[in-house]
Amino acid sequence: MKTGRQTFNKWQLPLTLVLFLSGLLLVMALRSLAASDSNPTRLQNDNLVNLIKTQEREIAGIQADISARRNLINNSRLTSASGKQALVSLQSQIQQLDIVAGYTEAKGPGLLISLDDNRKDAEAAQARNPAQFKPDDFLIHDRNLLYVVNDLRAAGAEAISVNDQRVVASTEFRCAGNTILVNTTRLAPPYIIRAIGNQNSLTRTLDLPESEFNILKMSGFPVSVESSPALLLPAYKGSYQFSFATPKAGS
Amino acid sequence: MDSVKKWRIPVLITFLLLGIMISVQFHTQQTFLSDLSLQKTDDLVLILQRLHDNRTKLEVDLYNLEQQQQALSNDTSSGASLADNLKKESGKLQTALGVIPVQGPGVTVTIPADSPIVYLDLVDIVNELWASQAEAIAINDQRVTGWTTVFWDKQKMTITVNGKDISFPCTIKAVGNPDTLDSGLRLLGGVLDSLAVFKIYPLVSRSTELDLPAAGPPVFRYVQPVPNPQQ
């Protein structure tokens, strides 16, 4: 009788612990299931998602129209300007500005950097301690992209792109929930950053212990960098518009 | 020995179930993170708003280009209107690139002298101002452009912008809609909230007239343009 009681006690504690944990997990799983299926905001969200997708499709159409028209105008300006010295120099000045403004694709030597969410460690961390698991710790955020881009600028990068978005002066890096917006366009991981510039200088900056790339690497994110003699960067498809800023008189 | 075996099987089964549940839970979480329709409604509204703003701007661009096209096809012989057209385009590009001084309404963010600020705080503030549709930005007397460097100089132990030491109080001026810029900085959990955690309290004031200096032209040696397709 006494020995039977002792063995009963021995497995009672671990089993209670395990059952308690399973209960906790079951509640979490059911809760997220409920959130995804019977949530009353789900229907409203579906409508919003449809609106977002329609808007994105139509914006892509307008952007294509704009770049086609810009080409046509540039060509007919060239024809109209030919022979008139003042106009020719103005036209070639605009062509130079277009390049810096990112209105043309860019090519050159530089680095190709890849940043991805840390799914492997996320899975392990959740298995180890599901109650304290914070998925945010294992995702690439808007600030991570912003800081890598800032490091590249500091290293003298002449042109930068993230996925299919050319980074210009006014490009913003913004989070909306778990979505990163760059040039108001949604980006998804992996994030491929292309930077044209002096390869030695760019590599030296990324190798600094305090560089954002290095911090991500040390934190276990799957990141990589490779040199390329000929990168091709997309053109900027956004808008430059000024409703408040005016060139200062007399300049 | 017998009693050991007795509890082994139920514990084994429970652990097995636990394992399955953890992996199921993880996959639910993953789909939850990537599925747009499972994001918070507020975030979706924000994305939609930004898309709408962007679209409005692009439509104005398109309209302007249509006008230009018409002007070009109407009087290809008249050099005067073409020159006007080209000058306007050139001015707009120079404003965008920050290579000419500009003026306009906006906000001034002043960071007091004794703030424990790091260079990334400046990068955050500038990023928030661009996200709030700033049209031109300057840190102290340095115009912020696509080739502006904001960095910590280890030798001099100071924050530098374009290689120049930043003196305090540091002022960041942004031309744009003062209301949009101000509310962008004050977003809940936004850049001012993050700085307050480190006891940094920048002063934000609206101005009706700001003067921003020009940046020097970029010296690019590696980038080459890919010409647009001829049509």
Image: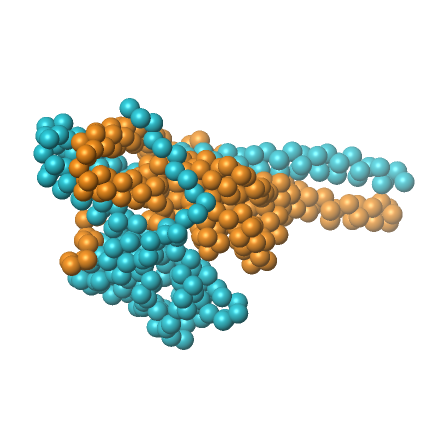
Chain colours: A orange, B cyan
Q: Residue furthest bottom?
A: B114
The total of numbered circles placed on residues is 0
- Quarter holding the C terminus of chain B is top left
Q: Considering depth in this image, is B186 or A224 the residue closer to the camera?
A: A224
Which of these two is toward me, B40 or B134? B134
Q: Determine whether, in the image, residue B67 is placed left or right of residue A8.
A: left
Decide if residue B35 is in sight here.
yes
Quarter of the image with the N terminus of chain B in it: top right
Q: Residue at x 65, y 33 (%)?
A: B20
Above or below, B37 against B198 in this view is above
Residue at point 64% right, 43% down?
A: A124
Q: Quadrant of residue B161?
A: bottom left
Extreme-top residue of the structure: B231
Q: Residue at x 46, y 61 (%)?
A: B151
Q: Position of residue A42 (x, y in %)?
A: 38, 33
Q: Residue at x 31, y 65 (%)?
A: B141
Percent x, y of residue A142: 44, 48
Residue lying at the far right of the rendered structure: B1
Q: Position of residue B110 (x, y in %)?
A: 31, 68
- The residue nearer to you, when weighing A121 against B109, is B109
Give the side of residue A92 with respect to residue B125, left or right: left
From what the image shows, is residue B111 above or below residue A38? below
Q: Is residue A251 above or below residue A239?
A: below
Q: Is residue A192 above or below residue B154?
A: above
- Asked if residue A40 can be seen in this view, the reply is no
Q: Quadrant of residue A99?
A: top left
